[in-house]
Amino acid sequence: MQYTIKFMCNKLKLPIHYNHILQGFIYKNIFDDNFREFLHEKGFEVDGKKFKLFTFSQLYGDYIFDRENKTITFLDRVELTVSSVLDDFNKEFLKSCLYNKELEIENQRVEVSEIIVNENKTKVNKAIIRTLSPITVYSTVNVNGRKKTIYFFPEDSLFEKYIKDNLIRKASLIYSESFENPKFQIRAVEDKVSKSILYFKQFIVKGTSGIFEISGDERLINTALNCGLGSKNSQGFGCVKLVKSI
């Protein structure tokens, strides 16, 4: 499921790198305490890796950008898109958004004006998608005893491989079955992608934004639409929107 929450605000001022603030807002507003603690502290594990099975977009709305003070101020309305395959997550988060009359982002009041829901249940094996937050793909290696993060982009051969491997792990959790070399391809639409550099708290995260064509096993595509592409989905990376099936 994917849904866009439209908020009314009064000059919502945030640092330009605000992913961790949105992540905190989402966790805080998971209505059930036990489920919130489980998702935040543990999540779902496969092959020694943990997944939260949700992702979210950047904020969209009219804004003022203050380069000197490194802030962004959304004037009177702002939109956040959230995607998750977890019924409990969607139910508990939307419950807070609908019934909590004191919602705050960075200690500033916001009020829900509309929620637009897309079930994302259409069976698709080839589609054009648009990123709502950058896709980040990386590997961590040891160099002279120190960890180094290497990021990959669409022009790198490992970009598709790591995205596919990541999707297979998430899909195996969702569908409770193993996937024996399922088909999956991702291709950047020429001249429609750009590289991004963001910070999550004090850590640099590099990613790619834009338009992509994806094809292959419909279960992997469904997983991508509902849980995100690439890594760090629950930190606000890899949220994508279906533009059209082809």
Image (tube, helix red, strand yellow):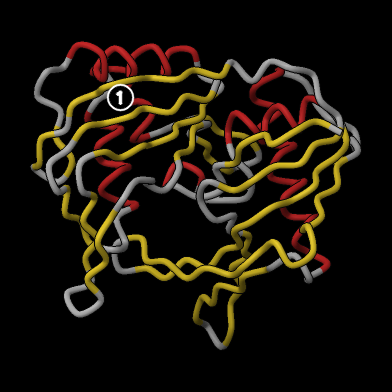
Q: In which image quadrant can residue 29 be found?
A: top left
Quarter the C terminus occupies: top right
Quarter the N terminus occupies: top right
**Residue at position x 34%, y 52% in the image:** 19
Position of 163 with respect to 8 (left or right) is right
Q: Position of residue 59 (x, y in %)?
A: 37, 46
Q: In which image quadrant can residue 172 be found?
A: top right
Position of 82 with respect to 8 (left or right) is right
Nearer to the camera, 152 or 99: 99
**Residue at position x 17%, y 48% in the image:** 12
Residue under pointer 1: 36
Q: Position of residue 22 (x, y in %)?
A: 30, 43
Q: Relative to 232, say whether 167 is above or below.
A: above
Q: Secondary structure at mark 1?
A: helix
Q: Relative to 137, say whether 22 is above or below.
A: above
Q: Position of residue 3 (x, y in %)?
A: 47, 24
- The kind of residue tagged 1 is Arg
Nearer to the camera, 114 or 96: 114
**Residue at position x 67%, y 63% in the image:** 193
Q: In which image quadrant can residue 108 be found?
A: top left
